[in-house]
Amino acid sequence: MTAKILDGNAAARHIRGQLRERVDALKARGVTPGLAVIVAGDNPASKVYVSNKAKACAEAGLHSEVHAIDGGSPERAVLTTLEKLNRDPRIHGIIVQLPLPRGLNAERIMQSIAVEKDVDGFNWRNLGALVGGHPSFSPCTPLGVMELLDRAGAALEGRHAVVVGRSNIVGKPLALMLIARGATVTVCNSKTPDLGGVTRRADILVAAAGKPGLIDAAMVKPGAVVIDVGINRLPQGGIVGDVEFASVKEVASLITPVPGGVGPMTVAMLIANTVTAAERAVTSRAA
Ligand code: GUN
């Protein structure tokens, strides 16, 4: 079997087109959805992601602004910027690009984003709402994975989903979303003993461990749906996921490529969350 390839670029383009109508409706009411991105330090990968986010905002008709903070700045510099953005009526969504430079406490910083502007969904209140089954803003990468699965028509109820990776921004929230849809979910990580024995039982296998080549063809059940969340930069240049794409695509029924799979979906979901935040701001203003 050769897997069908799930094209994240095409899906993201389609979603941005759908969002355009909601953006136009907001603009007709005098509101341009606005996203602020804080990037601290000079991580080259973060700079690329942030410029991709700004470009996608422009394409979807959103206002966006990037606040670059020197890597040597104290945490207070980030918090002061956040306080201003929390009060700024032109800004509906705020994200702080991760990873943060050493010395900055990501947890404390994420908790300082106003909950109604937390379009990354990293605030405990938003994560708690997801745990409780009443999601408000949910993290963008797992949302993008769910959107890709739905667009591919992948059945979730009664299926066994295995998530390799346990981060707060991907593995854990994705497991909650899959549970909410009736999947039987196993969460493991790169150090799980006999990882292949676990992954081979997956109808839906999501690799989000950040380890190039972690999943090979022998670890995949024939016909499984394989979603690769990994974005690993190789020392010799180029980007690969956590899945050995060439061999696994001969075993899986559906597979996402890297690049061009989950990555563009994360950005599309960020824009969707920002548009939702702007719609809620308009509704609460009118109430
Ligand atoms: N770094 C890697 N992924 C993400 C994400 O989804 N949001 C933020 N803020 N930083 C990231």
Image (cartoon, rainbow, N blue to C red):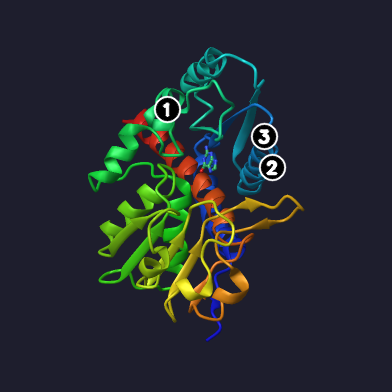
The answer to whether residue 59 is above or below residue 198 is above
Q: Nearer the viewer, residue 142 or 211?
A: 211
Tell me the number on the disc at residue 279. none
Q: Position of residue 134 (x, y in %)?
A: 25, 45
The answer to whether residue 119 is above or below residue 178 is above
Badge 3, how many Cα within 10 Å: few under 14, some, many 20+? some
Q: Position of residue 79 (x, y in %)?
A: 50, 17
The amino acid pointed to by label 2 is Val
The amino acid pointed to by label 1 is Glu
* Residue contact between numbered discs 2 and 1, judged by CB atoms under 8 Å: no
Q: Position of residue 110 (x, y in %)?
A: 44, 28
Q: Quadrant of residue 179?
A: bottom left
According to the picture, the residue beneath numbered tag 1 turns out to be 107
User: How far separated are the C-alphas under marks 3 and 1?
Assistant: 19 Å
The amino acid pointed to by label 3 is Asn
Q: Secondary structure at mark 1?
A: helix
Of badges 3 and 2, the one in the foreground is 3
Location of the C terminus by quadrant is top left
Does residue 185 appear to the left or right of 54 in the view shown?
A: left
Q: Secondary structure at mark 2?
A: helix
Badge 2, how many Cα within 10 Å: few under 14, some, many 20+? few
Q: Nearer the viewer, residue 241 or 65?
A: 241
According to the picture, the residue beneath numbered tag 2 turns out to be 48
Query: Which residue is at 52% across, 86% downward?
Result: 1
* Residue contact between numbered discs 3 and 2, judged by CB atoms under 8 Å: no
User: How far separated are the C-alphas under marks 3 and 2?
Assistant: 9 Å
The answer to whether residue 94 is above or below residue 189 is above
According to the picture, the residue beneath numbered tag 3 turns out to be 43
Q: Nearer the viewer, residue 188 or 193?
A: 193
